[in-house]
Amino acid sequence: MTRPLKIGTRGSKLALWQAEHVRSLLGGLDIAAAIVVIRTTGDDRLDASLAQLDRGVFVREIEHALLRSEVDLAVHSMKDLPTSIPAGLTIAAYCARHDVQDCLVSRTGARLRDLPAGGRVGTSSLRRQAQLRHHRPELICEDIRGNVDTRLRKLREGQYDAIVLARAGLERLGLAAEIAEILDTDVLLPAVGQGAVGIEAREDDAAALGLLARIDHAPTAIAVRAERALLREIEGGCQVPLGAWCRPDPASAGELLMDACMVSLDGGRYVREHLSGVSRDPESLGVRLAHRLRAAGGDAILAELRSTASGDV
């Protein structure tokens, strides 16, 4: 390619960090790239909670620009990308995954166990809210929207006693000093794809696909494929409080370990399962774990969620 590649991205600080990281990786191949900022529905709908918005609100406009050849690549936080992507597009590469954990940022530096009963915790993620309600039902989980700087400002203003954010995002933005506690995955299992950056391209763009294959991080690709297969098998038209984490088995080459949980909105129902599998077939591991979750009580949680979404009493 003689002209610079155009990288489509959202305009938040974190999204721009991700796009710059991809540009740097391409630069290592002596490939020039320019960043094109695209505003998405999710950026405009700050009045709505994430639970009210469909999956894809942070990527749809970027994907449309990619399909129209206005950009050559699209860089996404993988936890924002729906499991079904538009025909003609493919996830062509993954950057090496950062830490998957969530973390607590509190006004006083308090850890989760030390927050007082009735303490207000800001997070718009149903996954985080449900797991927090399971482990600390006496806390009050409240929606919070906006970029990282906006959320930190709302915390300092006293609107919340603590907020929950992804460790990867804070560290990428140089804000690790804000972290009061890194939350163990026994308390908060991460979102599918958390900490991973994916690069989307057109399936018919052989030149771009060839370049991206050279920067793809295979262990990340394998783990996220397993997690996305699990989510694809479970989601049924409503947002599900679900955590999942797949990673290489440190004790056995070529093997994967995977944990997943489903939680009711009030935190009362909690189902968690664990499986191992082979890295050459990560999708199969994700599907098998989804079936185990559903059989262990996940189907009851799904029925409750669908009932709530339809307005049934």
Image (cartoon, helix red, strand yellow):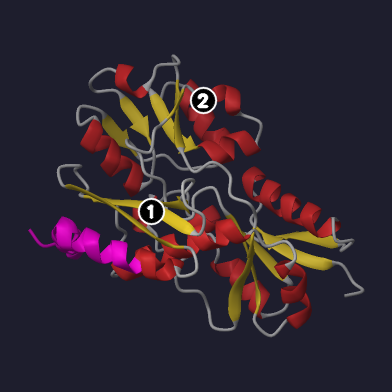
Q: Position of residue 104 (x, y in %)?
A: 43, 28
Residue 200 vertical placement versus 258 (above, below): below
Give the magenta-colored segment's residue range: 287-313
Residue 45 vertical placement versus 142 (above, below): below
Q: Which of the two marks, 2 or 1, is nearer to us in this view? A: 1
Report the front residue among 196 and 161.
Answer: 196
Residue 51 vertical placement versus 287 (above, below): above
Is residue 309 on the magenta stretch? Answer: yes
Q: Residue at x 83, y 62 (%)?
A: 33
Q: Residue at x 57, y 57 (%)?
A: 219
Instruction: Name the residue tied to disc 2.
Output: 179
Q: Position of residue 278 (x, y in %)?
A: 44, 64
Q: Position of residue 230 (x, y in %)?
A: 36, 64
Question: Distance of mark 2 from mark 1, alpha carbons?
Answer: 26 Å
Residue 238 appearing in the image? no
Amino acid at circle 2: Ile
Q: Quadrant of the C terminus?
A: bottom left
Tag 2, which secondary structure? loop
Q: Position of residue 85 (x, y in %)?
A: 51, 74
Q: Which residue in the rendered view is the most extreme toward the right?
A: 2
**What is the number of callouts on the image?**
2
User: Callout 1: 10 Å neighbours few (<14), some, many (20+)?
Assistant: many
Report the front residue among 203 and 294.
Answer: 294
Q: Residue at x 54, y 35 (%)?
A: 150
Tag 1, which secondary structure? strand
Q: Quadrant of the N terminus?
A: bottom right
Report the front residue among 292 and 53.
Answer: 292
Q: Residue at x 24, y 23 (%)?
A: 118
Instruction: Name the residue tied to disc 1.
Output: 258
Residue 35 appearing in the image? yes
Is residue 52 on the magenta stretch? Answer: no
